[in-house]
Structure formats: structure tokens, C-alpha cells
Image (spheres, grey):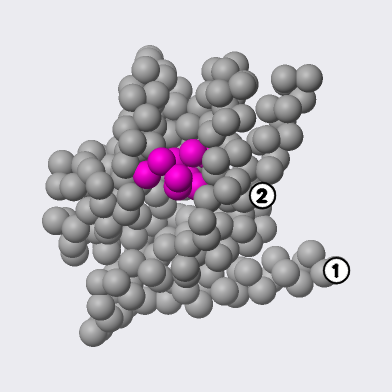
Amino acid sequence: MMHHRLSVLATLAIAALLQFPGSGARAGESFDAELDAVREAWAVANYQVAKDQREAAFEKLGVRSAAFADQHPTRPEALIWDGIVQSTYAGVNGGLGALGAAKRARARFEAALAIDGTALDGSAYTSLGTLYHKVPGWPIGFGDDKKARQLLEKALQINPAGIDANYFYGEFLFDNGEYAQALRYLETAQKAPSRPGREIADAGRQAEVRDLIARVRRKLG
């Protein structure tokens, strides 16, 4: 019963976060406020919405984030966050629409990198590298672990102590059987400083870090 109540509350929360006019941003709302709203809605959808409702939540959020990025095509932050939303939607969709969403995400990350690769602490490198790692390779998709490694390592050069940069590189290493190296980066992720205003995302990511560390240690014996 408690789990059901929390699920309902999370669903109501994201519904409130997603209310906006057709333009993609409320009249008079600043760029930073809209960026924060998209980011917060992503965290709620990813970590608090029930699994069977997550795809619909990201599909709806994708409309908002795409409109936001289209309104600000020279702002890498908007491009990055639309890419994150689209790539997350691809992950939860898993169907025929997944590859299309992944390609839209790739285009957003590449556009952001062309403007400023250091924006949001190198998040475009982290996200694009993860995308290359998770998308199937040719002939189904564009996945490429060699590119993924290069991009994820570039992200770490920009943000060596960041939770996401270390977690996703650790996950990449784990998936490739490099367990000792994976543990090193995951432990760095676990010690990453908290991010103001990102409490939901930080709590969710740290839970993922703990779970993957446990899996790595089982592999290492």
C-alpha cells in the first residue's frame, strides 16, 4: 500500500512538472528556470515514477525538452538535456521507436559538443559515450564501444570527480569485464560531492552506484 501511494505521488509530481504551454516554456520563464524544470522532471520520471508508467512520462517530457532545445539551439545546456531525455526514453521504450529516439539524442549531443564540450561539466561527452555503448552496433544501430571509451574518458578529463562521469565509465568497464578498473571509478562516484538542487538525481544515482559496486565485488570474488 505504501509503495502504491508513493507511486501515485510521484506520478502526480511529474504531471505537475510537465504542465506547460505549447511553446515548451511558460511565458516569461527564464532559461535557467526552464532548464531546472526539465532536469527535475527527468529525475522524478527516472527514479520515482512506477516502472510501468515511465515510458509515457518520458514520451511526454520529450515533447517539452525538444521544444526547449529548439527554442535555444545555441545553448548547449538545452541541447544536452533534450539529448538526455531522448536517450532515456530510448532506454525505457525498447521498441521500434527506441533507435529513432537514440538518433535524436545523438544529434543533440553532437550539436552541444560543437558549441562547448565543457558545458555542464562535460555532460555531452558522458551522455554520448553512454549512448554509443548501449545502442546496438551495426547493422541494427550505431553502437561503438571504441567511440564510447574515447568519449567517456574525455568526460573524465573535464570532470574527474563527477558522479555521472565516474558511474557511466565504471558501468562501461564492468560491461567489458574490466572489473578492477570499474571498481576504482565506481568508488570515486560514491565519494562525489552532492549537487545542489539535484537531490533526487543524486539519491537515485548513488543507489545505482551501490548496486553496481556489489555486482563488481561478486565478480572479483
Is residue 198 positioned above or below 121 on the image?
below
Crowd rating for badge 2 (residues with CA inside 10 Å; few <14, some 14–19, many 20+) = few
Check the image and name the residue furthest to the right: 1
SS under mark 1: loop
Residue receiving disc 2: 207
Instruction: Describe residue 201's horizontal placement relative to residue 61 as left or right.
Output: right
Check the image and name the residue furthest to the bottom: 28
Picture coordinates of residue 103, whole percent (x, y): 32, 36
Is residue 88 positioned above or below 32 on the image?
above
Instruction: Describe residue 203's horizontal placement relative to residue 198 as left or right.
Output: right
Residue type at the position of mark 1: Met
**Alpha-carbon distance for marks 1 and 2?**
23 Å
Residue 7, by quadrant, is bottom right
**Magenta stretch in the rendered image:** 159-167
Residue type at the position of mark 2: Ala
Picture quarter with the N terminus: bottom right
Picture coordinates of residue 55, whole percent (x, y): 54, 52
Which of 207 and 143 lies nearest the eye of the viewer? Answer: 207
Residue receiving disc 1: 1
Picture quarter with the C terminus: top right
